[in-house]
């Protein structure tokens, strides 16, 4: 969505970093972020927003989201933590859905894409359907599919290799 992304291919891994990122979105505070990360202006122009997110994660870990402004949803694979770190922007302009599949996770920007990855499909979440027909919002994180949840805006989530997701602001 920006000139810096021209020709970029994702998932993205940067030399010297163990992390891999998939980013949907854009950062609106590139200059401020580059200054905080001590990235020289000449080099900053060559870095994509996904690359800047990786640099921010390498510097601040999960607190990196406190330094990012824009509309984004991303997933970072952190092999050292044996986990995925996911985050969405404060306004929720970009979406992120997830479900557990066996020992792993399926993550996508649309709920039906997650359903498509589930080996046994997904059942209908009757509570969400009832809310829909009552013209009410579904409870936080619920979707029309029982197995699929949405990461809410302004939230981040750790998806460990084993155990339950840890979600917070």
Image (spheres, grey):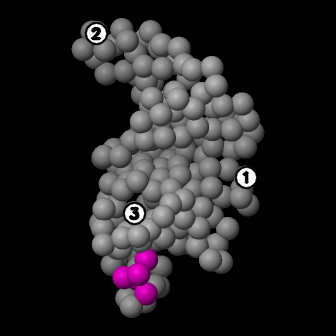
Q: Residue at x 57, y 20 (%)?
A: 121
Q: Which residue is drawn at 30% across and 72% down?
A: 3
Q: Is residue 21 visible?
A: no
Alpha carbons under labels 2 and 3: distance apart = 37 Å
Alpha carbons under labels 1 and 3: distance apart = 24 Å
Disc 3 secondary structure class? loop
What residue sits right under mark 1 in the picture? 82
Q: Is residue 149 visible?
A: yes
Q: Do the residues labelled 1 and 3 touch (CB within 8 Å)?
A: no
What residue sits right under mark 2 in the picture? 133
Q: Is the magenta stretch mostly helix, strand or loop?
A: loop
Q: Give the range drawn in magenta.
A: 43-47
What residue sits right under mark 3 in the picture? 68
Viewer-proximal residue among 58 and 115:
115
Of the residues under marks 1 and 3, which one precedes in the sequence?
Answer: 3
Give the left or right position of residue 139, taking residue 18 as reference: left
Disc 1 secondary structure class? loop
Q: Residue at x 48, y 70 (%)?
A: 51
Q: How crowded is mark 3: few (under 14 residues within 10 Å), some or many (20 or more)?
A: many
**Is 127 situated above or below 53?**
above
Where's the N terminus, which quadrant? Answer: bottom left
Give the left or right position of residue 81, taking residue 159 as reference: right
Which quadrant holds residue 42? Answer: bottom left
Give the left or right position of residue 2, taking residue 34 as reference: left
Residue 59, position in %: x, y?
56, 72
**Is 54 situated above or below 119?**
below
Alpha carbons under labels 2 and 1: distance apart = 41 Å
Of the residues under marks 2 and 3, which one precedes in the sequence?
Answer: 3
Residue 75, position in %: x, y?
53, 52
**Is 31 situated above or below 93?**
below
Residue 14, position in %: x, y?
58, 73
């Amino acid at each position: 969505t920006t000139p810096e992304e021209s020709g970029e291919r994702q998932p993205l891994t940067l030399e010297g970093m163990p992390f891999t990122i998939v980013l949907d979105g854009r950062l609106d505070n590139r200059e401020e972020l580059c200054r905080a990360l001590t990235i020289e202006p000449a080099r900053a122009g060559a870095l994509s927003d996904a690359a800047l997110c990786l640099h921010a994660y390498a510097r601040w870990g999960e607190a990196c989201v406190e330094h990012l402004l824009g509309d984004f949803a991303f997933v970072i694979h952190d092999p050292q933590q044996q986990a995925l770190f996911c985050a969405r922007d404060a306004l929720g302009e970009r979406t992120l859905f997830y479900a557990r599949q066996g020992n792993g996770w399926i993550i996508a920007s649309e709920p039906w894409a997650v359903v498509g990855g589930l080996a046994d499909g997904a059942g209908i979440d009757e509570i969400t359907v009832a809310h829909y027909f009552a013209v009410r919002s579904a409870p936080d994180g619920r979707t029309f599919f029982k197995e699929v949840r949405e990461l809410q805006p302004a939230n981040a989530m750790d998806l460990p290799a084993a155990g339950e997701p840890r979600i917070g602001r």
